[in-house]
Amino acid sequence: MSEVHHIHNQDPNAGAEQRKAIWKTFWILLILTAIEFVIAFTVPHGVLKISIFIVMTIVKAFYIVGEFMHLKHETKSLIWSILVPIIFVAWLILALLLEGHAIFSAIFD
């Protein structure tokens, strides 16, 4: 009986680019989150603060989707076919909130 020996020669640098990308993403998201914390404790409550949080949350979400779901490596038509409906839904929600507030103010004020 002969034994078969499998020798696995693995490159010690295998996956180095992926690890580098993950660490880069980690640091970018950490910096954005730290900026959010600074804004949370320094900027007075109001429309500016809420707007900054909404914009930073959207930026972080797009970065996470682009990096970890590999959307940034897809074709532009696929990216736009995902983004355009999201933009329209966000616009619809904003329009409904503003119209609802206007109707509520007209009835109860």
Image (cartoon, grey):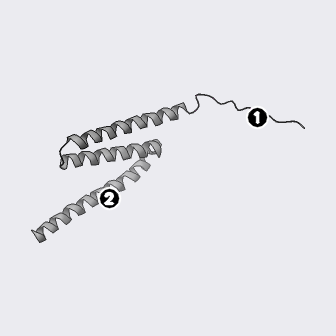
Residue at x 28% of width, y 49% of height: 54
Q: Quadrant of residue 39?
A: top left
Numbered range of the magenta stretch: 6-14
Residue 74 visible, this angle: no
Tell me if 44 is positioned left or right of 72 in this view: left
The residue carrying mark 2 is: 89
Frontmost of labels 1 and 2 is 1
Rounded to the nearest angstrom, the CA distance separating label 1 from label 2 is 55 Å
Q: Which mark is residue 6?
A: 1
Seen from this angle, which residue lies furthest top? 12
For the point 37% across and 38% down, the residue is: 30
Q: Residue at x 33, y 40 (%)?
A: 33
| Within-10-Å neighbours for mark 1: few <14, some 14–19, many 20+ | few
Q: Earlier in the sequence, mark 1 or mark 2?
A: 1
SS class, disc 2:
helix
Q: Is residue 89 left or right of residue 9?
A: left
Q: Quadrant of the N terminus?
A: top right
Check the image and report above or below for 54 versus 25.
Answer: below
Query: Residue 71's x, y, as percent?
Result: 45, 45
